[in-house]
């Protein structure tokens, strides 16, 4: 392979060159030890150059140097294809000898290029364009590039930037420039006639020498500069270096096509080669989401590189459930994990929590389902492992098991679509996440931009992406909560950091390694629960979160049949005249609320004296606890207004009272040794609701409610079902005798 790549530089005329690119891309897609079949059938690659449409490929020879097909390289090659440009890649697959690119180095680029263009050194009509690739995007066809080059009158044109680097002391030696022009040479992109470019490369340089310094010295030598016809593109006609130029450029995104162009607004130019030099990689990534026709109305880049999964050779995935903080609705979370559509024998399960609240469910999950997985391991709060180590261990496990992927799901990320893992695998990235956000909020699992300190900053497209007004796949600087990482990225990951939490450390390490973090909002695969103000030390904490987690609260506590009772074409049961019966809440609602009340334990004594009431007197006392006593009055009023009021409006037509008012919301406890029944009475309400909290025949015997006027009793009450009846005048009623066990009912006097 290495040999062929070297040759490809020399045999650029051959169509085999293109095939080599594709082959290297495919190799990359296949990965070193993945079991995915990423053959030509499986992978839809980026558009391929049709050389017949662009004879400019004979006029301008484009070269780049890359030792690995990184995400940045893929993006670069894609952009070259989009604009029908053939690129010769030098150095692919060879060991990099050019030093650390972050500080200095890059002499190897010069040595590779010199060798590659040697056969062209006398071709006076041929142009050579060289660009870096990992941090470069091409945004124009060669015709346009040629035109722009000719306008400059240069024989050799270099990109320019705002900083003098690597030798600052040379800054004064540069010719002055006006206004916001870029004064200093940048070696990341240049174009010139072949003889001039060859002459430029005349002097020898060590592979580890600095290419930018090398070119700078040529440029600052006025004789050489004149002889080569060498100029800097100080006004970004052709080349835009982004470092230090944030305020010089503006991304224009067409509202219909979502295609972007990057303009230099100081000089009103539209550069063709965009270079994320220095510290501007994150900016380039953000622009790159729109440049080079990633959209054409729809997201075109979403259709590229898609992987078809081969059912016979599915990748092995380590599924890591990470719960470093107390989260509501962890039971629902685990249901989402269990139903992931993927053979469990291809999943290595790793579950981590540092929260005592979640130990029990994790242990129970592994006990019940662990055997179905290829392997299963859990870490509980009692193991005293901190979050950083917990996440690191997930990665270690993935490596030990030779997993092709690590799929991380944090406790707040609820999977709603069991296809989630397959959908992410298909996207075929080194790192990809589905967009998850909190219901009714813009809070999500990604950041569109970074502040200078590396923290959150909002991007221009953040809201559109979260709201799915813009659908696609986006390269972003920070992702949390749920993501899929390919094995090729494992070695780059670091959780250790002096300042950052483990999530931020992970993202920084990926950014530093040039591994793109993609977020896709193409399909709604799940959501985040809201952990704000979640108090895990109360009894049944989930029950307390209706106001902060309405979606999950409804899922857990409102019965699936509830909606049927709002459907006008389905009759509502009426066991007695004007007494309606609805299935409203789940068993979990009843069990949690009883547990909360029994946890509180301060049942009233059943006497007429009641300090909780205005006036302190109760004519028909029960043994009860008010919602106010357990801090749930506000929540319960919300529940009544959201779920009960619409039922009332259906059966008692014409009565509207929004919001509902209710001063008395309380649970009553009947038992033979305490208070077993209640004498006939009216309620101080317009209507009363009465929800059965447990089951007759199982939890108690006897009981029920009798309406005296109609001599009609409801004794077969059912857990989670609610009776609704007028409070006064017609519905004089009594609580029937409980003969055994304990009966709980939840009462509200609505609109007193
Ligand atoms: C959480 O609940 C406990 C127990 O009811 C209470 O003592 C504590 O103040 C609550 N914490 C917060 C932050 O509300
Ligand atoms: C109401 O119920 C009818 C009969 O079951 C059903 O056909 C219809 O789809 C339901 N309407 C809604 C909005 O669910
Ligand atoms: C009330 O109903 C019960 C049982 O349905 C019946 O035995 C009783 O005679 C009725 N009483 C009156 C006053 O109608």
Image (spheres, rainbow, N blue to C red):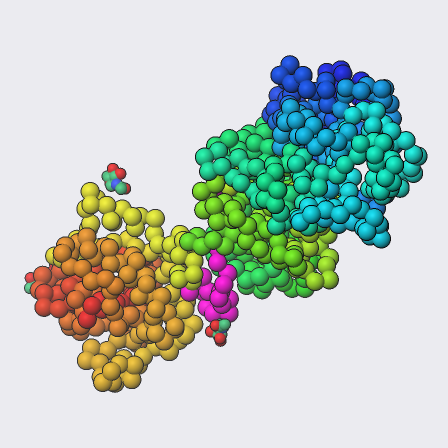
Q: Is residue 325 above or below residue 164?
A: below
Q: Is residue 342 above or below residue 167?
A: above
In the rendering, at what x and y percent does residue 469 appear? 44, 42
Tally the numbered discs. 0
Q: Is residue 516 above or below residue 644?
A: above
Q: Residue at x 85, y 27 (%)?
A: 198
Would residue 672 appear left or right of 551 to someone viewing this image? left
Would residue 745 appear left or right of 104 to someone viewing this image? left
In the rendering, at what x and y percent does residue 611 appear? 29, 84
Quadrant into which the N terminus falls: top right
Would residue 56 appear left or right of 542 to someone viewing this image? right
Q: Nearer the viewer, residue 467 or 265?
A: 265
- Residue 318: tell me if it is visible: no
Q: Which residues are magenta?
A: 522-544
Q: Residue at x 66, y 36 (%)?
A: 237
In the rendering, at what x and y percent does residue 62 appear? 74, 26
Q: Residue at x 70, y 23 (%)?
A: 86
Q: Is residue 530 magenta?
A: yes
Q: Is residue 674 magenta?
A: no
Q: Residue at x 24, y 55 (%)?
A: 646
In the rendering, at what x and y percent does residue 527 appear? 48, 49
Q: Nearer the viewer, residue 47 or 517?
A: 47
Quadrant into which the C terminus falls: bottom left
Split into quadrants, the picture shows ligand 3 in the one at bottom left
């Amino acid at each position: 392979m290495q040999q062929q790549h070297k040759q490809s530089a020399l045999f650029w005329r051959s169509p085999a060159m293109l095939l080599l690119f594709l082959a290297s891309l495919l190799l990359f897609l296949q990965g070193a030890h993945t079991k995915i079949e990423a053959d030509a059938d499986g992978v839809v690659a980026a558009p391929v150059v049709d050389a017949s449409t662009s004879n400019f490929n004979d006029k301008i020879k484009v070269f780049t140097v890359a030792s690995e097909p990184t995400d940045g390289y893929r993006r670069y090659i894609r952009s070259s294809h989009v604009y029908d440009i053939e690129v010769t890649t030098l150095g692919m697959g060879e060991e990099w000898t050019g030093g650390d690119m972050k500080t200095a180095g890059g002499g190897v680029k010069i040595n590779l290029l010199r060798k590659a263009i040697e056969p062209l050194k006398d071709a006076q009509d041929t142009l050579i364009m060289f660009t870096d690739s990992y941090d470069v995007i091409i945004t124009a066809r060669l015709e346009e590039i040629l035109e722009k080059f000719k306008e400059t009158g240069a024989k050799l044109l270099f990109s320019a930037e705002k900083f003098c680097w690597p030798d600052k002391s040379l800054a004064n030696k540069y010719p002055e420039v006006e206004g916001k022009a870029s004064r200093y040479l940048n070696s990341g992109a240049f174009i010139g006639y072949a003889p001039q470019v060859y002459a430029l490369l005349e002097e020898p340089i060590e592979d580890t020498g600095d290419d930018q310094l090398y070119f700078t010295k040529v440029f600052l030598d006025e004789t050489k500069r004149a002889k080569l016809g060498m100029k800097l593109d100080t006004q970004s006609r052709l080349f835009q270096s982004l470092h230090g130029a944030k305020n010089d450029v503006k991304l224009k995104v067409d509202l219909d096509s979502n295609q972007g162009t990057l303009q230099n607004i100081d000089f009103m130019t539209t550069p063709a080669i965009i270079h994320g030099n220095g510290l501007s990689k994150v900016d380039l990534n953000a622009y790159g989401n729109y440049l080079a026709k990633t959209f054409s109305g729809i997201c075109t880049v979403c259709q590229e590189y898609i992987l078809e999964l081969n059912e016979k050779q599915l990748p092995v995935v380590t599924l890591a459930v990470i719960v470093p903080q107390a989260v509501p609705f962890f039971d629902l979370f685990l249901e989402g994990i269990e139903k992931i559509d993927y053979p469990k024998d291809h999943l290595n399960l790793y579950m981590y929590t540092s929260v005592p609240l979640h130990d029990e469910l994790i242990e129970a999950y592994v006990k019940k389902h662990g055997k179905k997985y290829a392997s299963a391991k859990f870490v509980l709060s009692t193991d005293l492992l901190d979050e950083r180590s917990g996440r690191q261990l997930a990665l270690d496990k993935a490596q030990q098991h030779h997993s092709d992927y690590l799929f991380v799901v944090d406790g707040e990320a609820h999977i709603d679509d069991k296809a989630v893992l397959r959908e992410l695998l298909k996207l075929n990235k080194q790192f990809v996440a589905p967009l998850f956000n909190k219901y009714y909020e813009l809070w999500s699992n990604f950041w569109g931009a970074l502040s200078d300190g590396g923290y959150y900053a909002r991007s221009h497209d953040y809201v559109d992406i979260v709201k799915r007004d813009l659908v696609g796949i986006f390269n972003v600087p920070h992702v949390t909560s749920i993501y899929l990482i390919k094995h090729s990225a494992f070695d780059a990951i670091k959780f250790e950091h002096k300042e950052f939490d483990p999530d931020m450390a992970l993202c920084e390490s990926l950014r530093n390694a040039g591994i793109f973090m993609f977020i896709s909002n193409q399909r709604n695969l799940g959501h985040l629960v809201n952990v704000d103000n979640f108090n895990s030390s109360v009894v049944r904490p989930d029950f307390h979160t209706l106001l902060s987690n309405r979606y999950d609260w409804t899922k857990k506590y409102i019965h699936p049949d509830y909606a049927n009772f709002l459907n006008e074409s389905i009759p509502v049961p009426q066991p007695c005249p004007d007494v309606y019966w609805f299935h409203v809440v789940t068993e979990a609602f009843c069990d949690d609320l009883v547990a909360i009340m029994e946890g509180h334990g301060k049942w009233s004594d059943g006497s007429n004296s009641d300090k909780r009431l205005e006036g302190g007197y109760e004519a028909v006392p029960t043994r009860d606890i008010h919602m106010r006593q357990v801090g749930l009055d506000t929540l319960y009023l919300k529940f009544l207004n959201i779920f009960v009021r619409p039922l009332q409006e259906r059966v008692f037509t014409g009565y509207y009272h929004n919001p509902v008012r209710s001063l008395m919301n309380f649970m009553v406890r009947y038992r033979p040794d305490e208070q077993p029944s209640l004498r006939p009475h009216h309620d101080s309400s317009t209507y009363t609701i009465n929800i059965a909290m447990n089951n007759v025949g199982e939890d108690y015997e006897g009981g029920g409610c009798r309406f005296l006027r109609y001599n009609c009793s409801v004794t077969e009450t059912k857990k989670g079902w609610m009776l609704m009846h007028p409070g006064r005048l017609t519905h004089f009623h009594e609580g029937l005798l409980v003969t055994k066990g304990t009966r709980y009912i939840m009462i509200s006097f609505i609109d007193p």
